[in-house]
Amino acid sequence: MNRRNFIGFGVLAMATLPATLSAFSSIDFRATKPDAWKAKTVADAIKGLYGDIKPEASDKVKVKAPKVAANGGAVPVSVKTDIPAKTVAVFQDMNPESAVAVFNIPDGAIVDYGFKIKLKATDENGGNGTVTAIVEGKDGKFYKGTVSLNVAKGGCEG
């Protein structure tokens, strides 16, 4: 590639970059919905983010995590759905604050996210913790998927 073509492609890329980035604009949910991030229970966090909703359990919202996480410092979690979505929010009931993340979904995007979260150990009596995903559909409905897991060594305890 010669220098002129390289510069021409660079200028074209720089001209289209702002339009591309605006398509992936995000909402700062921590600033706009602070109550969701201070909530101590999943129900309160969902209410703080979305208001009084009644999400329906759906097998189309798939949440995966290991049944037993050996170390809570980095527990792999994945959320996948085919539902056309506006947002996907993730919550858990093991740490002091329940909200984990909220994803603003651009039009036409595929929801198949994988990430790691830090979780406190579940109790010694064999109690399970739960990770919950709420999908806000473009149809105005809310859908829910959950997964239960045990955390052997807590990441939030040290």
Image: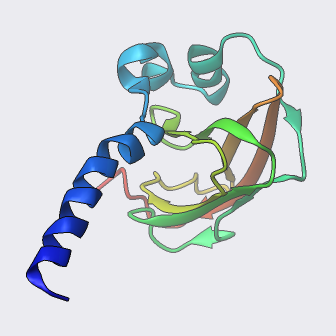
| Outermost front residue | 4
Residue 46, percent from left and from top: 64, 23
9, 142: nearer the viewer: 9
Residue 43, percent from left and from top: 67, 23
41, 102: nearer the viewer: 102
114, 22: nearer the viewer: 22
Q: Which residue is drawn at 77% across and 16% down?
A: 53
Is residue 13 shown left or right of residue 11?
right
| Outermost bottom residue | 1
Is residue 42 shown left or right of residue 155?
right
Q: Quadrant of residue 25?
A: top left
Residue 66, percent from left and from top: 64, 71
Residue 141, percent from left and from top: 83, 26
Give the colouring mode of the picture.
rainbow
115, 132: nearer the viewer: 115
- Where 149 sits versus 98, above or below? below
Report how many numbered discs are placed on residues in the image.
0
Q: In which quarter of the image is residue 150?
A: bottom right
Is residue 106 shown left or right of residue 25?
right
Check the picture and name the quadrant holding the C terminus.
bottom left
Q: Residue at x 25, y 68 (%)?
A: 9
- Where 91 sits versus 82, above or below? above
Is residue 89 shown left or right of residue 32?
right
Q: Residue at x 57, y 42 (%)?
A: 106
| Outermost left residue | 3
Check the picture and name the quadrant holding the N terminus.
bottom left
